[in-house]
Structure formats: structure tokens, C-alpha cells
Image (cartoon, rainbow, N blue to C red):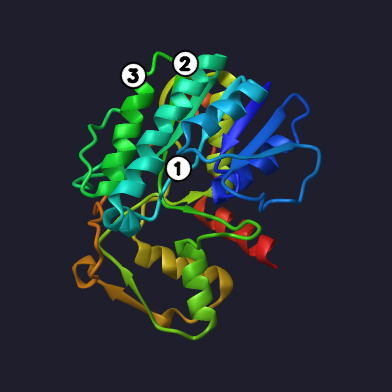
Amino acid sequence: MKILITGSNGLLGQKLVSLLYLKPEITLIATARGANRDEIYEDYIYESMDITSEENVLKVFRKHKPDAVIHTAAMTHVDQCELNKEACVDQNITSVKHIVKACKEVGAFLLHVSTDFIFDGTRGPLTEEEIPNPVNYYGWTKWEAEKAVENSGLKWAIARTVLVFGVVQDMSRSNIVLWVKNNLEQKKEINVVNDQWRTPTLAEDLAMGCWLIVKNQAEGIFNISGEEMLSPYELAHKVADVWKLDKGLIKQADSSTFTQPALRPPKTGFIIDKAKKQLGYKPHTLEEGLDLLKEQLT
């Protein structure tokens, strides 16, 4: 099977490359904007591809004719999306339409990666049947992208995820676990929200969930996340426990005290029963995920 990944330089993208590279039945085509930041492995194809350019996308797809596409590339910085709406639409909606068109042309199965931020956060954890109602521009663009995929006429799947953490080579962005660890190691006080709830997701688990969907050509929407629901404040404490850092530096904060351009949904998190039953998806516990991350950073 020939699998093309978009956003292969990102956290999820690099984890997918690591996972799929080891599978002899897979021919891997990794794509991202600019140079390849993940050069640990050899003997796989890397193509620089600008997802906002229809011409560029079609050219790469026509050249490689993938059987399946895992579309991870997106503008995910929530506040930047609020401040730069045109770029957000380009990267999160227009690009998806280009990917859909290219998949149609080559007959590829499309797996699109989405987010808990399509919901308003009035309740959680959520099943795949929950009705989206985004509270910020990022969430709106991701919901629009989902609709473009659902109405594409393709064989498609959507993997929704929550608060992904992990570490890879040459990361362009940090994540909450690394942010907490790095600040506490530097003996810096941090304010962490205690009135939002999520089911944090280890990047390796999300990559495995994506592979299980593609391997089984499983169609529809799947929640792919961790199982443990907790606040960022509680998560920060768990990070401090694993790295044996000073929990006294972690201060509780109400989300209303943060002046951020974009609203955050208070309570999301996912029920992952469908993925467990239909795909055999089995995420690490949060403690196992943090231990694995500690091992990788040692």
C-alpha cells in the first residue's frame, strides 16, 4: 500500500513516518512545506508540497498515485488563527479541497485529522455523534474542513483528537507537557488553567489510531485520544511527578484571567469506545505516555 502523509514535519507527521517506515508492506511518501526535518530514516520518499497550492498538490499526487492519504497538515495555533483568518482558511479549508480533488483523481482513501475544538465545550467527554458548535475561528475552519471531506464522494475517515503531546526531531512547536517540564526545570512559576478539561493524547497513540483506520479502510468519524479526563492544572501536577519537579511552582488559574484572542471550549475530551471496538485501538495510560516521553528525552 502506498500512503502519502501531509504535514510530515509536524509532531503527528513524524510519528507516522516512524511507525509506517517500519512496515514492509507500506511505500511511504512524506510531504511537508520546505525541507525534510525528519532525516533519521532513509529509503522513503520526501516531497516538498505546499497544501495551499492546488497545482502543487495535484503534481505530487499525479507523480506518486497514493492508495491512501493521511492529512495532518493544518494551521493549529488557535490564537494565530483568530488573528490571521485568511491564512487559517487557506491552510485549513482551501487546502482540504485541494487534497480532496487530488484524492478523487488518483482514487485514494482520505483520512483527515480533526480536533475537539469543533465543539463548544459545554459538556464532555463526547462521542462521535456530538453536534459541532465551535467557539473560535480555528474550530470553525476545522469543522468546515470536516464537511468538505464528508461531502467529497470519496472513501473517507476523520480522526478527531485532543491535546496531543510528545517529542520529535526539530519541533516547530512545543506542547503543554514539554512547556510544563521546561518551565519547572528552570524553577519558573507557571499559571495553569483549572477550569478546562481534556483527554490528553500521546502522539504515538494518535499515529497508531491513524494507521489502524487506514489499514482497515475504516470509514466515518473516529475519536482517537487518551482516556483520562483531567484539567491542564492536574496534568501539570502529573508532569511534575514523573520528572520529580517542584509542584509548588504550579499555580491554579481561572481561564478568564488569560487574555487570549481565541476562546477555548471549557470541557471536551472524548469517549473512544468506537475506535477500541472497531479498530482495536488501545491508548497508553497517561502515566505510561509520560514515562515513555521521559525515556525519549533521556
Q: Is residue 125 visible?
A: no
Along the viewing direction, whichever of 275 and 145 lies nearer the viewer = 145
Q: Nearer the viewer, mark 1 or mark 3?
A: 3
Give the answer, above or below, for where 153 lies relative to 189: above
Disc on res. 155: 2
Give the answer, above or below, for where 107 lies relative to 239: above
Q: Name the residue under label 1.
A: 225
Q: Name the residue under label 3.
A: 151
Residue 161 location in percent, x, y? 42, 42
Tell me the residue at 55%/46% (across/down). Answer: 12
Q: What secondary structure is marked by label 3?
A: loop
| CB under 8 Å between discs 1 and 3 | no
**Location of the C terminus (image quadrant):** bottom right
Disc on res. 234: none
C-alpha distance separating marks 1 and 2: 23 Å
Amino acid type of disc 1? Answer: Ser
User: In terms of image quadrants, where is residue 58?
Assistant: top right
Relative placement, left or right, of 171 versus 248 is right
C-alpha distance separating marks 1 and 3: 25 Å
Along the viewing direction, whichever of 261 and 102 lies nearer the viewer = 102
Q: What secondary structure is marked by label 1?
A: loop
C-alpha distance separating marks 3 and 2: 10 Å
Residue 189 location in percent, x, y? 40, 83
